[in-house]
């Protein structure tokens, strides 16, 4: 009876370990996501320019938006463009701490630095829920 119980216990733990190997925590961050992120940064990195101008204008006013906003937007555009090409060229190789995650600092909510994984979205429609409220469908 003890032998049967121990065999079942080992089989149960083996199934759990096998399941974790099949879908590890970093499974979403693979080479195809890295390639897609690189292509998005090359093609749509220019959206940093109008986004930063509008963001600095909201935070600090018109003068800062027309001077510092342009400079910050151009700097972030060139960073996204160069980082995008780097990720396109090296997409099959895990390079950041043995994973395919983005190597740049993430956007911290209380700081005005860091980058999101993909370039910012422009316009009025977005997938983020805090932008627009819709009437409930009846």
Image: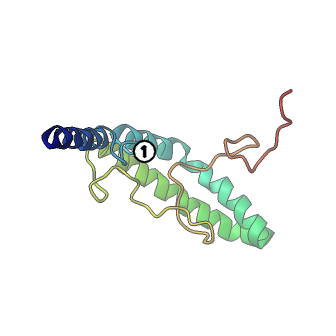
Q: Quadrant of residue 20?
A: top left
Q: Is residue 33 above or below residue 105?
A: above
Q: Nearer the viewer, residue 8 or 125?
A: 8
Quadrant in which the N terminus is drawn: top left
- Which class describes the residues within 10 Å of circle 1: few (<14), some (14-19), or many (20+)? many
| Residue 53: image location, x then y, percent | 70, 61
At mark 1, the secondary structure is helix
Quadrant in which the C terminus is drawn: top right
Q: Nearer the viewer, residue 28 or 72?
A: 28
Q: Is residue 39 left or right of residue 27?
A: right
Q: Is residue 65 left or right of residue 98?
A: right
Q: Tell which residue pokes out farthest to the top in this image.
A: 138
Q: Is residue 6 left or right of residue 74?
A: left
- The residue depicted at 48 percent of the width and 54 percent of the height is 80
Q: Which residue is mark 1?
A: 38
- The residue depicted at 84 percent of the width and 34 percent of the height is 136
Q: Is residue 98 above or below residue 7?
A: below
| Residue 89: image location, x then y, percent | 31, 44
Q: Nearer the viewer, residue 48 or 2?
A: 2
Q: Quadrant of residue 48?
A: bottom right
| Residue 119: image location, x then y, percent | 56, 49
Give the colour scheme shown.
rainbow
| Residue 118: image location, x then y, percent | 52, 48
Q: Is residue 17 above or below residue 138?
A: below
């Amino acid at each position: 009876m003890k032998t049967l119980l121990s065999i079942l216990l080992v089989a149960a733990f083996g199934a759990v370990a096998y399941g974790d190997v099949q879908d590890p925590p970093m499974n979403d961050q693979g080479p195809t996501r890295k390639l897609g992120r690189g292509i998005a940064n090359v093609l749509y990195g220019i959206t940093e320019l109008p986004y930063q101008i509008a963001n600095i204008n909201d935070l600090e006013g018109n003068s800062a938006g027309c001077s510092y906003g342009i400079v910050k937007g151009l700097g972030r555009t060139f960073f996204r463009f160069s980082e995008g090409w780097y990720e396109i060229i090296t997409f099959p190789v895990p390079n950041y701490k043995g994973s395919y995650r983005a190597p740049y600092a993430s956007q911290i909510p209380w700081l005005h630095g860091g980058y999101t994984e993909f370039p910012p979205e422009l316009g009025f429609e977005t997938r983020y829920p805090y932008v627009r409220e819709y009437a409930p469908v009846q």
